[in-house]
Image (cartoon, helix red, strand yellow):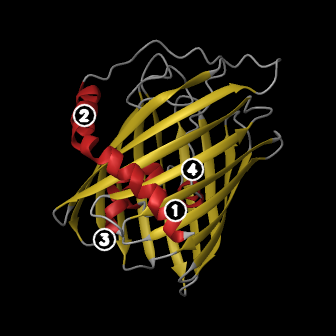
Amino acid sequence: MRDALRGVLWRALRWSSPLFTALLIGLASQTAHAQITDPPPDSARLPEDSGATTRGLALGTGSRANALGTSAVMYNAANLPLARVYHVESIFGYLAGEGAYTLGGVVADSVSNKIAAGLSTRAIFGGGARPYDGWDARMSLGMPIGDSIGIGVSGRYFSLTRADQDSSFVSRKGFTMDVSVRVTPTDGLNFAALAYNLINRNTSLAPTLLGGSAAYSFSDRLSLGADLLADITTFDTVEYLVGGGVELLIGDSLPIRVGYRHDTGRGTGRVTGSIGYVDRSFGVDLAFQQTVTGKEPGTQLLVSIRYQVQ
């Protein structure tokens, strides 16, 4: 199974790696010219939905500067080369009280090649406050520049349609891309510059977000991180997603995380957290996100099972 997964991942990488530098240059140019556009037609301004890992959900806005492995695939491809891992993760998500759930998987490989890579896929089954069905897929590439800098790019395709005929949701599909740069000035300290959905699809589910993240790790036991992202396409004015979290490893096998996330555009605040178990070859996590202010759906749960090949 490991060899088959690795073969698929690196065939995709060999096909796309000649485009890596060109994509970074082109997308950086788009970032420089990003500006506020007309708000998307989503009448409810549905919250951003580009997938999450249990670790990322538990740490508020993701603690993206020190995202590793499968979390780097989803949040910060520039971090893929930071840790030599080969992880395969399955993720199940549930939106309590809405009858909506997701099924997905992520593969991260920073062992097989100098350019680290990851793939993710996800199926979305909507209901209630998530009035859309669909799927998405992502490929992420990360490359180190010396010992202290990394660059990353992710390409994502999504297709979302109305979950029922009573919904006013406008179907959306298309390709978009993210870029990131990570700087590590000293051991344990990471800074990241982040840009998401640079190809604007005019939907609040995939807004153009620009911002940064900072994180510090004390050995392998404790880490702190914070993120600030500016949403420049969903509302009439720029609004912000801000938050962060704390991650603690008790013993060698019990990761505990807590965080907070605030969305100025929707006026929502959410507390987050997770508990899990990890050893050299296996990991499992249960994460939650609970709305404490605002009108968005109250409770979101994610469960992941991770196979750590290396």
Q: What kind of residue is marked 1?
A: Leu
Task: Find disc 2 in the rendering and name its residue.
Answer: 28
Residue at x 74%, y 43% (from the top left corner)? 298
The vertical placement of 84 against 21, above or below, is: below
Secondary structure at numbered mark 1 = helix
* Residue 144 occupies quadrant: bottom left
Residue denoted by label 1:
5
User: Is 72 left, or right, of 124 in this rendering?
Assistant: left
The N terminus - image quarter = bottom right
CA separation, marks 1 and 2?
Answer: 31 Å
**Mark earlier in primary sequence (4, 2):** 2
Q: Amino acid at mark 3?
A: Gly
Mark in front: 1 vs 2: 1
Indicate the secondary structure of the residue bearing disc 4.
Answer: loop
- Between label 2 and label 3, give the one nearer the viewer: 2
Task: Give the mark nearest the N terminus, 1 or 2.
Answer: 1
Whether pointer 3 and pointer 4 mark residues with C-beta atoms closer than 8 Å, the reply is: no
The label on residue 188 is 3
Q: Are marks 4 and 2 in contact (CB under 8 Å)?
A: no
Tag 4: amino acid: Ala
Instruction: For marks 4 and 1, give the one nearer the viewer.
Output: 1
How much space separates mark 4 and mark 1, taking CA atoms? 21 Å
> Which disc number belongs to residue 52?
4
Q: Mark 2 or 3 closer to N-term?
A: 2
Instruction: Mark 4: give few (<14), some (14-19) or many (20+) Cα within 10 Å.
Output: some
State which tag comes first along the sequence, 3 or 4.
4
Identify residue type, mark 2: Ala
Nearer-N-terminus badge (4/1): 1
Graded by Cα atoms within 10 Å as few (under 14), some (14 to 19) or many (20 or more), the crowding at tag 2 reads some
Residue at the spot x=51%, y=59% of the render? 107
